[in-house]
Image (cartoon, rainbow, N blue to C red):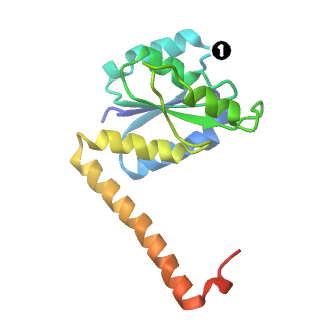
Amino acid sequence: MKPLVGIIMGSKSDLPVMREAADFLDEMQIPFEITVVSAHRTPHRMIQYAEQAADRGIQVIIAGAGGAAHLPGMVASITTLPVIGVPIKSSNSIDGWDSILSILQMPNGIPVATVALNAAKNAGILAAKIIAIQHPEIAQRIRVFKETLSQKVLDTVKDFDNLGYQNQVK
């Protein structure tokens, strides 16, 4: 099956964070592609990727970047597809705030859905929800995932009720 989600990142060093989006999409059985596309070092590759993604069947792009973090916004300025930005706290980052603000503060007309710092899993979940609009089987898998989240909290409530708050991990 053709990839429905494109996962791109500014450099290979972003992979430990971006892998979480890929892992979630794998869990949901959503085909994806993953590659490095640098806005600053390979601008022509970035333009080509953004221009051709929809024609290849991609429905959502997840773009992760650290530092100046121009990749998500630049891709969003080129494609008509929804772009989800993942700000990454990189080695040259100012505590991650530079990445967050570079992705979050887009001008009107070029929206980028932005998740929390290093929250690639949330980007994968959001991409899955967008794709689920047209794929009921994916929507069902997301429902099961959400029920699992709910059950984990309810199990914690039982622990609190049985053990008391004093015996919980600090």
> Looking at the image, which is closer to me, 71 or 5?
71
Residue at the spot of label 1: 41
Rendered view: 6 above or below 167 = above
Residue 144 shows up from this direction: yes
Residue at 57%, 43% in the rendered image: 116
How many numbered circles does the render carry? Answer: 1
Please tell me in which quadrant of the rendered image residue 51 appears. Answer: top left
Residue at 40%, 40% in the rendered image: 127
Residue 22 shows up from this direction: no
Q: Which secondary structure, mark 1?
A: loop
Mark 1 crowdedness (10 Å alpha carbons): few <14, some 14-19, many ≥20: few
Q: Amino acid at mark 1?
A: Arg
Rendered view: 165 above or below 14 = below
Residue, far front = 108
Q: Position of residue 49 (x, y in %)?
A: 46, 18
> Looking at the image, which is closer to me, 133 or 95?
95
Residue at 49%, 84% in the rendered image: 158
Relative side of 154 to 20, left or right: left
Relative side of 101 to 110, left or right: right
> Which quadrant holds the C terminus?
bottom right
Rendered view: 12 above or below 145 = above
Please tell me in which quadrant of the rendered image residue 65 appears. Answer: top right
Q: Position of residue 139 (x, y in %)?
A: 28, 50
Relative side of 17 to 139, left or right: right
